[in-house]
Image (cartoon, coloured by chain):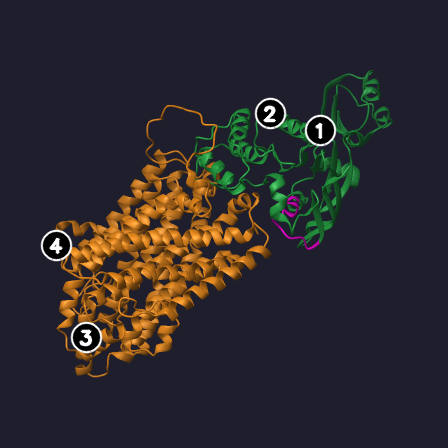
Chain colours: A green, B orange
Amino acid sequence: MPSAISTQGLTKDYGAGRGIFDLDLTVAEGEVFGFLGPNGAGKTTTIKLLMGLSHPTRGSATILGLDADRDAVAVKRKVGYVPGELPQFGGWRGSEIVAYIAGLRGDLDDREVEAVAKRLDLDLGRKYREYSHGNKQKLALLLAFAHRPALLILDEPTSGLDPLHQQEFYGLVRDARARGATIFISSHVLSEVEHVCDRVGIVREGRLATVGQLDQLAGMRAHRVEIVFAGTPPIERIRAIPGFDQIAVEDHRVSGMFRGDFEPLLAALASSRVTKFESREPSLEEIFLGFYR
Amino acid sequence: MTLLRLAVRSHRTGLIMTALAGTVGGLLNSIGFAQIAGDNPAARALFAQQMELLARQLTYLLPAPAQLDTMAGYLVWRWFGSVALIYGFWALLAGTGAGRGDEERGLIELWLSAGASRTRLIAARVAGFAAVAAISIAVMLAGAAIGAAIGQEPLPIGPLALQGVAIWILTLVVFAFALLVAQLVTTRRSATGISGILVLVLFMLNAAARSGIDVGAIRWLSPFYLYERSTPLLRGGSLDTLATVMLALGALALVVLAVVAFVSRDVGGPLFRGAPGKATVKWRPARDPLLRMPVLAIVDQQRVWIVAWALGLALLAGFLTSITKTTVDALGNSDIPMLRAYFERAGINAYADFVGVIWFSTLVLLISLFVAVQVNGWAADDAEGRLEAILSAPVSRARVVVERITAVVVACAVLVAVSSLAVYLTATSTGISLPAGRFVFASAAVLPVAYAFSGLGHALVGWRPRIAVAILGALAVVGYFAQQFAPLFQWPDWVTNISLYALYGTPMSKDDWGGIATLIAIGLAGTAVAIVTMRRRDVGR
């Protein structure tokens, strides 16, 4: 399958270890790719390089067969983009911003704008400064999706969206994919990429740590587990449970990172009186600490 | 104390710029006086007579002259009149920045959520600016005092300090006024525009009063009128207690009103809101066809701003043209050699020439400042993410540069057309016959000046966006004063020629196609450099 995005040794060095280094990545056409990493990992830097907004220190990126830096204008005809930091349009109305960008693009269909605006429940008659953060994000999404691009590059696209509109966003992504578009989504929220992505790359401290299918990621999935016992915790039994690491004990409280099937863990606890059992999805940073330390 | 420190810190650039400009200006004016005024009573008397006649034509800009045979009198007229404008301009920007700029950047929300009260916030901003303004004015006065001492005519410290007090209180009044205006609107830009126009009106009120136009008791409303009541440096002069107290009380009242308004309104909202209209949801893009057209879209976005500038320029144009006849008649009867030399070098032989020299030299300065404001907007486009939004469309960076510069020239064409119409109508109504061909040519020739400044401005934005406006503003102001002072002090031609405005020449008197071509060449070179720097840089950094 031809690649929609391909980078070869792509590097942007801001000094002091900041930036993105030697990125070799391929995203196939029609794929939904999640680009994960904690804040400051280099996600936005990568996206700005792909969009031709920054120039690489070395290496190159190809977007739909075009050089991202040299052919930036041609690339953007085919790309819909949501920036990581929303622009400030002050007193403009949403409808004026869309008309202005439509004038610049030349390929924005008013009916498609209307359809996306209705889907996201975005009133274009209001002034930009009166928009909530979520509405500003919706406007950015509208501008990215409304011209039905072949490739969508979305930098933390659900930031500020309420759960209802997050679902609508996932629907937009699924529809875009259904018509053959490629989608590149950066995020620091693991569960978000699970909704829509086929494949995931994890970037940390400016370097690509791993790339894999989403089901491979499940193997990386861990839960932060905290158990409070009525009596003394059965430490030996707990330590013997496969996949339970980073165990910490404090009086009646036991915590740790758990990977895999919960069945052995629950079986080990069956004979003890448990007053609290809490399991939550760990942050990416916790996963990184678990996997890459 | 933290808020106060932050307030002081937020004014540090203004402090450095005004203190620097004030020191240099104070030194130059005082040393300049010592060099040109002569060293015996007869020479001084002749100098004073010449200057007084010249000063009469500058009453729209500077205070009425008095005791121009002394260092103190000359500085009160020439320097402390101009410096009040510099501090007023700074106060205006600082006041709107404190009233709206911080809010636009989300700082007000941050401080309020940290537990600071709204009253305390305003009090800290006022106190911070008052402290910084006092330091800047003290430095500026020190520059003048050192220059006067070098010129062997030291200024008395006590009266000099009182002069500083007068400037300081005037500065605080303008700051408080801008702070209050900022509570009424929702953006810093609107606040700056509205308070700028209102301060200009108050300034013109005083200018009209000192130009002999009867404006009645309304002149007391102008803080500039009250400021000029105090003349502590003049023989027999003093700090006018009534005027100073009125100014101080005025500043206090404006601050109190600003506090009340700030406490009453929503953060991010204006003080007064219209009744909520019938809610109609809009799903489609705006129908305004201009928004979809290259160049015109940029002009359209600024329509309110351009109209405000056009009105301000038309007012000033009308005023300057209305005093032309009186001024030229008064000056024409003079047989003082220096004044004749000034007239000859400035090319003034008739009313039309006077309009050419006074109006068009002012217009090119104001148009350059308009361009500088636009350049500031270009730098902000990058910092505030708008450039990134534009470049996410299939638009080349070169196109962005060319469209922006073209849009500025188009906006300038509107401003020039409106103000020239005001000049023409006022001239006709006062019986001044302007040669139509030359007048149209002189008006059109302003556009290459705008183009040259735009090209240079964009080149600077691509190179150093944060200081682009300061450099461009300095280029405009220094160029203007070099043009104005060169004939007055008979400075060599090279001084005049360092000004870009020298290339504009005096088109009401003679053609200078070489100058126009050079301006266009500068514009083209600036555009080319701007395209190269724009292509090379990373957006948003």
Q: Is B15 rendered above or below residue B276?
A: below
Bin the neighbour count of mark 2 within 10 Å (Cα to Cα): few under 14, some 14-19, many 20 and up.
some
Q: Position of residue B58 (x, y in %)?
A: 22, 65
State which chain disc 2 sits on. Answer: A
| Disc 3: which residue | B50
What residue sits right under mark 2 in the picture? Answer: A168
Left or right? Give the position of B111 relative to A70. left
Residue B214's disc is: 4
Range of magenta residues: A47-58
Q: Secondary structure at mark 2?
A: helix
Q: Of the residues shown, which amino acid type is indicated by label 4?
A: Asp
**Which residue shows up at 70% across the image and 35% down it?**
A34
Residue assigned mark 1:
A194
Task: Sort mark 3 into few (<14), some (14-19) or many (20+) by Cα contacts within 10 Å.
Answer: some
To the question of a shared chain for discs 1 and 2, the answer is yes
Badge 1: residue crowd in 10 Å (few <14, some 14–19, many ≥20): some
Circle 4 residues within 10 Å: few <14, some 14–19, many ≥20? few
- Of residues A88 and A283, the one drawn nearer to the viewer in this rendering: A88
Query: In the image shown, does B105 or A286 lie closer to the viewer?
Result: B105
Spatial distance from mark 3 to mark 4, Cα to Cα?
26 Å
Residue contact at pointers 1 and 4, CB within 8 angstroms: no
Q: Are marks 2 and 3 on the same chain?
A: no
Q: CA distance from mark 2 to mark 3?
A: 78 Å
Q: Earlier in the sequence, mark 3 or mark 4?
A: 3
